[in-house]
Image: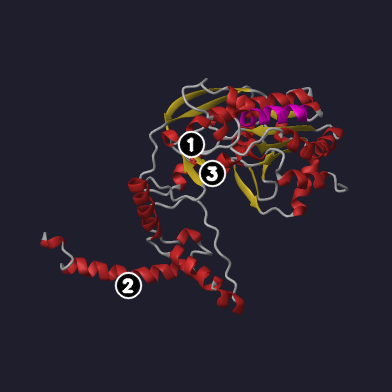
């Protein structure tokens, strides 16, 4: 027992060495890591997520109002080598003792289901007549964009992706205040999609499609620890998108695939994206997810469509179907424009290629032979990137 006590010379020596090294390693992370992130020294599992740093504004006004001191303190705190251990210990303690999630904006529903608060708030604020209001505001914009591409012989598709709350409301509404009516919640997207179709917009209502598949598979199409559709959902919607591309083109630009799947535990990516962001030592992963294996009908290495300029403009729900379309439907030249200009994804393997796109880099969207615009049902008809895309292809608007 005495050998492990703090009074033991070896223990005291180790503690003293730690106290001396901690500020030195922190200084190293402050000076070296910003330019050489691979040389950053951290103790413990890497924290998930990205933290936006406060700007360092070296001015008298920033010093007086305290914003400069706050930004400096934030950087020093983030540079601490033991910060991953401290954050995870704090989060684990709060979660295990009080069931408290330390990730801002995330709520936990029945069965451990996780979702962002914004999706819940939107779902419970839907009102009768919302479809008419949203459609009136967006139809002319989508028509201008569609007319531009169709006049050039290109394919245009407007997609509506599903939200997890709308797919499995029973997990989130029990005991929660939700003032909207069942009719307002469930009829909004079908009515909205129909109004757009009646106006001549080429719409794929993937939200209603995915909700209609509920109970079809052994697992839900949304993982417990994530907010986006899983691999089966991605495969099913990529198939519909490819079929619509080929229908509009009058020929097979996106050759079909078949797929099989196995069921296993959550491993990575969308299966556990929110669970990982909780940054606990032992995130809840006791749930099953599908792993899909694709069988393309042709070799994409030689298929002519691999060079077709394809653009996918949308939210985070764009990534999985876009990656499948590139890899398994032979649209290899596809680029995903995340919220239009925040970042551009593509390549093999699928990855971020560019961040913060300037207007000059967005002009290439005018040359797309296949244009896919996606909005999630939680903000259908309100995305600012539709206005910006309209101005790119119709500057007079």
Question: How far across and down, in percent of the image, does residue 13 sit?
Answer: 22, 70
Task: Identify which residue, 293 or 20, lies in the foreground.
Answer: 20
Sequence order check, earlier mark of 1 and 2? 2
> Residue at the location (48% across, 36% down)?
271
358 lies left or right of 225: right
- 1 vs 2, front mark: 1
Question: How far across and down, in percent of the image, does residue 41 sit?
Answer: 41, 61
Q: Which residue is mark 3?
A: 117
Sequence order check, earlier mark of 3 and 1? 3
Rendering quarter of residue 154: top right
Q: CA distance from mark 1 to mark 2?
A: 41 Å
Task: Identify which residue, 378 or 186, lies in the foreground.
Answer: 186
Question: How far across and down, in percent of the image, does residue 106 sit?
Answer: 50, 45
Disc 3 residue crowd, few under 14, some 14–19, many 20+, Cα 10 Å: some
Question: How far across and down, in percent of the image, does residue 53 sit?
Answer: 54, 62
Q: Is residue 370 above or below residue 57?
A: above
Q: Quadrant of the N terminus?
A: bottom left
> Residue at the location (57% across, 32% down)?
166
Q: Secondary structure at mark 3?
A: helix
188 lies left or right of 221: right
Q: Which residue is mark 2?
A: 20
Q: Is residue 191 magenta?
A: yes
Answer whether labels 3 and 1 touch (C-beta < 8 Å): no
149 lies left or right of 296: right
Q: Secondary structure at mark 1?
A: helix
Magenta residue span: 184-197
- 3 vs 1, front mark: 3
Q: Secondary structure at mark 2?
A: helix
Q: CA distance from mark 3 to mark 1?
A: 18 Å
């Amino acid at each position: 027992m005495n050998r492990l006590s703090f009074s033991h010379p070896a223990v005291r020596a180790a503690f003293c060495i730690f106290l001396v090294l901690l500020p030195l390693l922190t200084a190293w992370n402050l000076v070296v890591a910003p330019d050489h992130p691979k040389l950053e020294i951290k103790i413990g599992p890497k924290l998930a997520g990205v933290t936006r740093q406060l700007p360092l504004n070296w001015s008298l006004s920033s010093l007086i109002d305290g914003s400069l001191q706050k930004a400096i303190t934030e950087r020093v705190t983030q540079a601490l080598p033991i910060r991953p251990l401290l954050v995870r210990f704090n989060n684990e303690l709060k979660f295990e003792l009080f069931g408290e999630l330390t990730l801002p904006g995330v709520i936990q529903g029945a069965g451990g289901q996780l979702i962002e608060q914004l999706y819940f708030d939107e779902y419970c604020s839907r009102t009768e007549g919302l479809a008419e209001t949203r459609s009136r505001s967006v139809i002319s914009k989508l028509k201008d964009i569609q007319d531009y591409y169709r006049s050039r012989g290109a394919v245009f598709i407007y997609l509506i992706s599903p939200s997890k709350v709308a797919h499995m409301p029973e997990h989130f509404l029990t005991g929660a205040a939700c003032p909207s009516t069942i009719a307002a919640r469930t009829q909004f997207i079908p009515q909205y999609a129909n109004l757009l179709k009646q106006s001549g917009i080429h719409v794929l209502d993937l939200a209603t499609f995915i909700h209609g598949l509920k109970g079809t598979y052994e697992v839900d199409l949304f993982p417990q620890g994530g907010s986006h559709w899983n691999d089966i959902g991605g495969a099913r919607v990529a198939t519909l998108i490819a079929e619509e591309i080929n229908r509009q083109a009058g020929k097979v630009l996106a050759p079909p695939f078949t797929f099989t799947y196995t069921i296993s535990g959550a491993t990575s990516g969308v299966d556990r994206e929110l669970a990982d962001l909780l940054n606990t030592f032992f995130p809840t992963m006791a749930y099953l997810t599908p792993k899909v294996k694709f069988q393309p009908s042709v070799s994409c290495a030689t298929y002519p469509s691999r060079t077709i300029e394809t653009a996918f403009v949308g939210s985070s729900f764009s990534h999985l179907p876009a990656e499948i379309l590139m890899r398994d439907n032979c649209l290899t030249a596809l680029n995903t424009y995340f919220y239009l200009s925040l970042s551009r994804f593509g390549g093999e393997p699928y990855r971020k290629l560019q961040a913060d796109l300037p207007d000059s880099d967005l002009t290439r969207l005018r040359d797309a032979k296949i244009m896919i615009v996606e909005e999630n049902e939680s903000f259908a008809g309100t995305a600012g990137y539709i206005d910006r895309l309209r101005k790119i292809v119709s500057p007079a608007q």
